[in-house]
Amino acid sequence: MAQCFLLGGSQLVKYEIETTAALEEHARLSIAFNVASKMVAEPLNSPVGGWSLREVSVASPYVKDYDEGGPPTLRPYWDTSQWRIVSAFVADGRVGGAMVACRTAGSDFLEGREDIAAIWDIRVAPEWRGKGIGTGLFDTVVRYAKSIGCVELKIETQDVNVGACRFYAKQGCKLTDVIPEAYPDWPGETELIWRLTI
């Protein structure tokens, strides 16, 4: 399932579905980003519920790098044989990727469902950010998830990842769960769960 899209400046971006054998190459892309603000989630006063997000500055800006403890690895006690990496290439160079998790017994995040897929890890090379690579990755993930019978996409991010929050909202995802102090290793951070019906 390879797809090609033309970026501004006539650069062709090719999106490919790979197995997790490509994880090492995927992990070479930086996932680090600057944190100068964070999102505060506030419940909507609505019969259907929901959340609004308000951006606030942080006292001391810093760089957040999810790979600080080492690059992403697959958990050996899970069967990840159905997982895939959607990869973006420009002129044969890897510029982005999104790991898609699905059909994994024992993963609470996937809720024991066969019809839900999750973006487990998405990253774009810093010099390619803001150029549509992430949107292409997301669209390809959605198409792939639909092709394997999934009806919902689920994504986790944190309140300090303002760019990701804006990105998922722009893709039509709904913020459904807000879990303060969810991370023992990252005190003060709030887990945000986004969902998209596909």
Image (cartoon, rainbow, N blue to C red):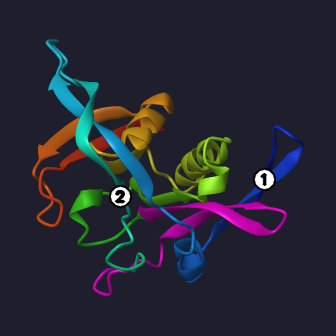
- Taking the image as shown, residue 122 lies to the left or right of residue 187, namely right
Q: Residue furthest front?
A: 60
Q: Note whether residue 71 is visible.
A: yes
- What amino acid does circle 1 point to? Val
Residue under the image location 32 percent in, 49 percent down: 157
Q: Which x, y percent locates residue 94?
A: 70, 67
On the picture, is 141 further left or further right than 65?
Answer: right
Residue 136 lies in quadrant: top right
What residue sits 59% from the left and 53% below the top?
Answer: 147
- Closer to us: 138 or 53: 53
Do the numbered discs 2 and 1 sit on residues whose CB atoms are within 8 Å?
Answer: no
Residue 64 circle label: 2
Look at 74% across and 62% down and name the residue there. Answer: 89
Which numbered disc flags the more N-terminal residue, 2 or 1? 1
Looking at the image, which residue sits at the far right? 10
Density class for disc 2 (Cα within 10 Å; few <14, some 14-19, many ≥20) is some
Q: Which mark is residue 13?
A: 1
Residue 42 found in image quarter: top left
Tell whether 149 sits left or right of 1.
left
